[in-house]
Amino acid sequence: MRLPQIQISSQTAKIGIETIAGVRTIEQRRAEVRIQTEQPKMEVVNHRPILQIDSSATWDAINGGRPEGFTKRIYSQSAQFVQQHIMTTNEKWRRIGDLAAGGDNPIPDMAFAEMGRERPALPVFGPASRFNTKIEFSVQRPDIEIMPGGIQIDVESNQKPRIDYEPGRVRHYMERYPSVTVTPPPIVDLMA
């Protein structure tokens, strides 16, 4: 025979929770930015190139050059030619003086030599050369002055930000209550 049993069942409680998060709203107008720039400036001063041509030696070779230089050249060489002429004249008269010593007669030979004699070449012109003309070309560097520019930034922030906050909510409720159910055994007739 089976003994009667009591049945007990329990059910847990269930709590429901609903949350709504808080909402934060921030509004702010943009700041005003003013930018002012100043362009850099550059000043450049160029110098003209200088070309110098010295052609005095060329003109000395062509036509004797300036009268002062021409006269100076002749004057500076005249002493040398005078000395040479004196030496030639002394030699000539020395040979004539030897005539008395009983030598050959040099006078006809000297007369014949005088007849074909050329005048001494007096260099009154300068020497001819391809390097007579001197050319100098000078270039100066430009003067450069740079004045740096600038930038000026003004920022004007508008009012303080406007902050709105709507708080959230938490709602809790009992979704299911706890319960314990006890079921008695069926009534058994013990007499039977």
Image (tube, helix red, strand yellow):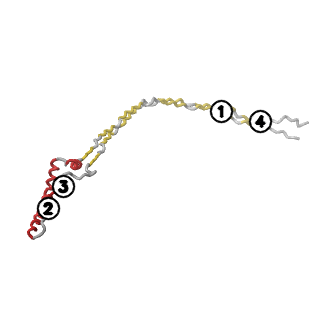
Return the disc, 4 or 1, that comes first in the chain's sequence.
1
Q: Position of residue 56 (x, y in %)?
A: 22, 48
The alpha-carbon separation of the residues under discs 3 and 2 comes to 21 Å
Q: Report whether 177 appears left or right of 71.
A: right
- Which residue in the rendered view is the most extreme toward the right? 192
Q: Which mark is residue 177?
A: none
Question: Which residue is disc 3 drawn over?
Answer: 121
- Position of 103 compared to 49: left or right? left
| Amino acid type indicated by mark 1 | Gly
Q: Which residue is mark 2?
A: 110
What is the number of the mark on residue 182? 4
Q: CA distance from mark 2 to mark 1?
A: 159 Å
Q: Are marks 2 and 1 in contact (CB under 8 Å)?
A: no
Q: Nearer the viewer, mark 2 or mark 4?
A: 2
Q: Which mark is residue 16?
A: 1
In the rendered image, the quadrant that contains the C terminus is top right
The amino acid type found where label 3 is placed reads Ala
Q: Nearer the viewer, residue 23 or 135?
A: 135
Q: CA distance from mark 4 to mark 1?
A: 26 Å
| Secondary structure of the residue carrying numbered label 1 | strand
> Which mark is in front, 4 or 3?
3
Foreground mark, 3 or 1, reads 3
Q: Nearer the viewer, residue 146 or 144?
A: 144
- How crowded pointer 1 is (Cα within 10 Å; few <14, some 14-19, many 20+) is rated as few
How far apart marks 3 and 1 lie (CA) works out to 140 Å
Query: Could you tell me how far apart the alpha carbons at marks 4 and 3 are, in whole angstroms?
Result: 163 Å
Secondary structure category for the residue under label 2: helix
Return the disc, 2 or 4, that comes first in the chain's sequence: 2
* Residue beneath the point at 85% across and 34% down: 187
Q: Position of residue 23 (x, y in %)?
A: 54, 30
Instruction: Identify which amino acid the numbered label 4 is placed on.
Output: Val
Amino acid type of the residue tagged 2 in the rendering: Met
